Image (tube, rainbow, N blue to C red):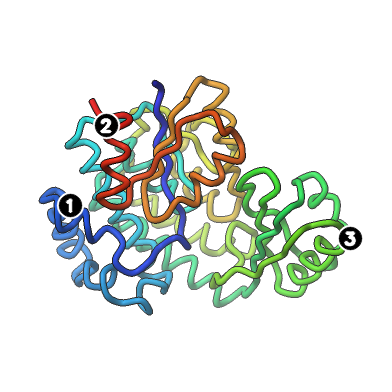
Amino acid sequence: MKTAFMFAGQGSQYVGMCKELYDNHSCVREVFEQANKTLGYDISNIIFNDDIKLNDTKYTQLSMFVMYQAILKVLEKHGISSSCSFGLSLGEYGAYLHNKVFDFETGLKLVEQRGLAMNKAANANPGRMYAILGMEADVLESLIDRVKGYVKIANYNTYGQLVISGESEAADELAELAKSSGAKRAIMLNTSGAFHTDLMKTASIEFSKYLDSIELHEPQKQLLINTTGTYYESNIKKVMSDQIINSVRFYQMVEKCLEDGYDTFIEIGPKTTLSSFVKKINKDVTILNVEDSKSLQTTLSIVGV
């Protein structure tokens, strides 16, 4: 069995996530206590009780990151490990954490600054994102040239499921063109900006400047990165700042894992969105997740040591 950890992205959060693990594991409670102390406010109350704040990017990304650390601690306690990790967009920060690129406290501060920079850029350069279902990447890419304005494929999630992002009118036009050209659906996403595009350029620059003052470490294990869809090679700070404006190549990262013999994928974080993506790519691998007591027990029963 060759196991890869994959970390869920922003958008899968829900009020009460991680509560069962919090109630049943002291190591999880310690993570939340550390987060509260570092941030200077009660992040646990937001995660467990405050739907409005949980869905505000300022708090969403931090809440997800706290959950990554909590689940990693539970898996570590039970002897579950992985030699490879990757994530979807924000989820890449869970993979950095797993790879000890930074410690938990440093990660909280990084995620906080990233979210603030992206919010500022989104307010200055508004745009839209759509999920395009039932159309392959090469077909959608060929339609982009027919659209006025700036729009691109921001997420290569899985076969036949892509996300476009860009200027509002251009994104609207491409979504309609995709539907008239054979896409099954085009769904506008509830996001605060056109993420993973050049409309986030100021956020990338601002975050890059912040990273200059932070000490980071080289990954200790295999790390797949969004911007290339393959393994990390060098310059972790540039990878982090570039990710804000570059496309997320999720299915390419999964393909790389499969090519290298990974046969077990464990999704870390709320819901099973990434698990569903992997299932469309290869139904024969073992796909698990950890978000609550039931999913933890299922995972332990299959990969427990």
Q: CA distance from mark 3 to mark 1?
A: 50 Å
What type is the residue that disc 2 sits on? Answer: Ile
The quadrant of the rendering that contains the N terminus is: top left
Disc 3 + disc 2, Cβ < 8 Å:
no
Q: In the image, which is nearer the foreground, mark 3 or mark 2?
A: 2
Q: Is residue 266 left or right of residue 153?
A: left
Front in this rendered view, residue 212 or 199: 199
- Dot 2 or dot 1: first in sequence order is 1
As drawn, the label of residue 146 is 3
The quadrant of the rendering that contains the C terminus is: top left
User: x%, y% of residue 166?
Assistant: 69, 65
Q: In the image, which is nearer the foreground, mark 3 or mark 1?
A: 1
- Dot 3 or dot 1: first in sequence order is 1
What type is the residue that disc 3 sits on? Answer: Arg
**Which residue lies most toward the bottom here?**
52
SS for tag 1? Answer: helix
SS for tag 2? Answer: loop
Q: Is residue 75 left or right of residue 188?
A: left
Name the residue beneath numbered marker 2: 80
User: x%, y% of residue 21?
Assistant: 21, 53
Name the residue beneath numbered marker 1: 28
Front in this rendered view, residue 19 or 81: 19
Q: Quadrant of residue 218?
A: top left
Q: Residues within 10 Å of mark 3 (few under 14, many from 20)?
A: few
Q: Residues within 10 Å of mark 1 (few under 14, many from 20)?
A: many
User: x%, y% of residue 45?
Assistant: 22, 72
Q: Is residue 111 above or below residue 156?
A: below
Q: Is residue 252 above or below residue 112?
A: above
Q: CA distance from mark 3 to mark 2?
A: 49 Å
Which residue: 30% across, 58% down? 109
Q: Is residue 85 above or below residue 153?
A: above
